[in-house]
Amino acid sequence: MLVEAAHAIAGSKSNSKLRKFFMMVKARRGTKIALVALARKVVCILYHLLIKGETYQDEESCKSKRIRKVGGFSSASMSLDEMIQTICRAGYEVRCLSNLEGG
């Protein structure tokens, strides 16, 4: 699923930093490695957004665009529980890391 998201970013016509990152890695290492590197970068961004409760803004692609609230919430005003509920409503399973590590 993450590589599919990376495919979508790489195939977009926008001039985003993520697409520029993909193109740079692709030139050096090849398409497959660049897709996996981009997928990892996206996961790292998502993790930090969830932990810090910030919104992602790509300076290149959103200079004149408004940031739209998704589902009536802005990510800065959502609590961790609200974020987890939103992810669960989207059909994903959320597990606590302590439960995964302990067995």
Image: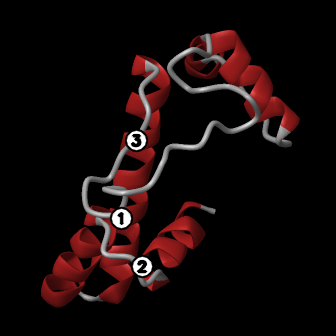
Looking at the image, which residue is at 23% across and 69% down?
21
Q: CA distance from mark 1 to mark 2?
A: 8 Å
Q: At which x and y percent is residue 90?
A: 82, 42
Pair 1/2: label in front: 2
Residue 56 can be seen in this image: yes
The residue type indicated by label 3 comes to Tyr
Q: Quadrant of the N terminus?
A: bottom right
Q: At which x and y percent is residue 98?
A: 57, 12
Tell me: residue 5, above or below residue 78. below
Q: Secondary structure at mark 2?
A: helix
Out of 11 and 71, give the one closest to the viewer: 71
Out of 77 and 10, give the one closest to the viewer: 77
The reply to whether dot 1 and dot 3 touch (C-beta < 8 Å) is no
Identify the residue position indicated by label 1 in the image: 38
Q: Secondary structure at mark 1?
A: helix
Tell me: residue 8, above or below residue 93. below
When asked about the image quadrant of residue 69, the answer is top right
Q: At which x and y percent is residue 10?
A: 42, 79
Instruction: Judge the density around disc 1: few (<14), some (14-19), many (≥20) Cα neighbours within 10 Å.
Output: many
Q: CA distance from mark 1 to mark 3?
A: 16 Å
Residue 95 can be seen in this image: no
Looking at the image, which residue is at 42% across and 84% down?
13
The residue type indicated by label 2 comes to Ala
The reply to whether dot 1 and dot 2 touch (C-beta < 8 Å) is yes
Identify the residue position indicated by label 2 in the image: 10
Q: At which x and y percent is residue 11?
A: 47, 84
When asked about the image quadrant of residue 56, the answer is top left
Furthest residue to the left? 28
What label sits on residue 56 in the rendered view?
Answer: 3
